Amino acid sequence: MKTGSTANIVKLEKKASPKNTWIRSSHELLKRKDLTANAKLVYTYMLDRYLFFTSLEKEYYENMQDIGDALGIQRRTVGDSIKTLEEVGLLRVLKKKVHNTERSVVSHSYHVRDMYGIHD
């Protein structure tokens, strides 16, 4: 039995990342000329996240920096893509003011139009 300051330390094993996780895209989306490659990537990612959260009966909130980090693109590129997706009707951004004691913050939730008919 260990004694001293290291007696209560438990070494945690790092869990492996899930294997075979995929996000699919359709040929219809890939052929669209009104969307950039980044907008298509952002749409595919956001649809996947939206379907996950709606399956749990939750709203989909995610900040643009986290989306960019997940996809390996800049936050500004995510913002431009979201604007484009909203303009073509694939995404709706809902803005909600959140008040705290120091300042007001605007929070965004997203409704992603499922062009594949995966989720009704």
Image (tube, rainbow, N blue to C red):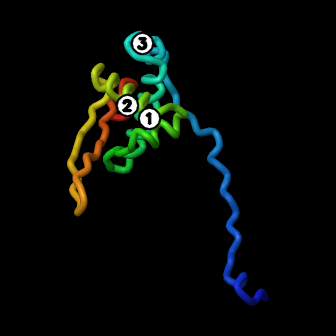
Q: Secondary structure at mark 2?
A: helix
Say which residue label 2 marks.
Answer: 79
Q: Which mark is first along the chain, 3 or 2?
A: 3
Q: Is residue 69 left or right of residue 108?
A: right
Name the residue that disc number 3 marks: 32
Instruction: Please name whichever residue, 37 or 22, is drawn nearer the observer in this view of the structure.
Output: 37
Q: Are marks 2 and 1 in contact (CB under 8 Å)?
A: yes
- Seen from the viewer's position, the closer of residues 27 and 62 is 62
Instruction: Tell which circle, 1 or 3, labels the residue nearer the N-terminal end.
Output: 3
Quadrant housing the C terminus? top left
Question: In the image, which disc is placed on residue 75?
Answer: 1
Disc 2 to disc 1, C-alpha distance: 6 Å
The reply, left or right, for residue 109 in relation to residue 38 is: left
Residue 86 lies, in percent from the top left, at 29, 26
Q: Position of residue 10 (x, y in %)?
A: 68, 75
Local SS, label 1? helix
Residue 114 left/right relative to 94: right
Q: Nearer the viewer, residue 88 or 97?
A: 97
Tell me the element at label 3.
loop
Separation of residues labelled 2 and 3 (CA atoms): 19 Å
Name the residue type under label 1: Arg
Dot 2 amino acid type: Gly
Task: Name which residue lies at 52% across and 39% down.
Answer: 70
Where is residue 103? Give x, y as percent: 23, 55
